[in-house]
Image (cartoon, helix red, strand yellow):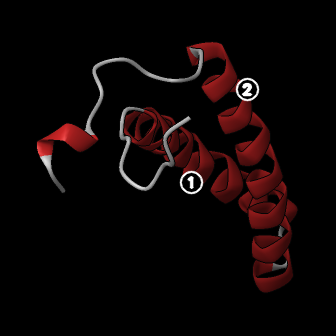
Amino acid sequence: MPPSAVTGSPRQLRSRALVKTLGYRLLMIVVTVVVAWVILGDVGDAVSIGIVANVVKTGLYYAYERFWDRLTWGLSEP
């Protein structure tokens, strides 16, 4: 990726990226808990798995989203 593809400033507010991240992760917590519950048959274990896995994933997704927000590669010029 050429150096000119990276911009110094993001194109969206941090709050927007944070709301998108939290909304998506909430959906993924529900999916993870349901799948773990079906497999394990224990709601407590399923909730624990869902929460721990998704807290870690939320932080990683937010950082990933912020990184991509600084890239101009693949975007058409306005």
Secondary structure under the numbered disc 1 in the rendered image: helix
Name the N-terminal-most of marks 2 and 1: 2
User: Residue 64: x percent and y percent?
Assistant: 42, 43
Q: Amino acid at mark 2?
A: Val
Q: Which residue is mark 1?
A: 53
User: Residue 32: x percent and y percent?
Assistant: 74, 65
Residue beneath the point at 67% across and 46% down: 51
Q: Is residue 32 left or right of residue 52?
A: right
Secondary structure under the numbered disc 2 in the rendered image: helix
Q: Which residue is mark 2?
A: 19
* Vertical arrangement, residue 49 with respect to residue 7, above or below: below
Q: Residue furthest front?
A: 78
How dense is the environment of label 1, judged by Cα within 10 Å: few (below 14), some, or many (20 and up)? some
Report which quarter residue 8 is drawn in.
Answer: top left
Q: Residue furthest bottom?
A: 39
Name the quadrant of the C terminus.
top right
Report which quarter residue 63 is drawn in.
Answer: top left
Q: Is residue 13 left or right of residue 38?
A: left
* Vertical arrangement, residue 77 with respect to residue 27, above or below: above
Tag nearer the camera, 2 or 1: 2
Name the quadrant of the N terminus.
bottom left
Q: Residue furthest left?
A: 3
User: Residue 4: x percent and y percent?
Assistant: 19, 39
Residue beneath the point at 86% across and 62% down: 43
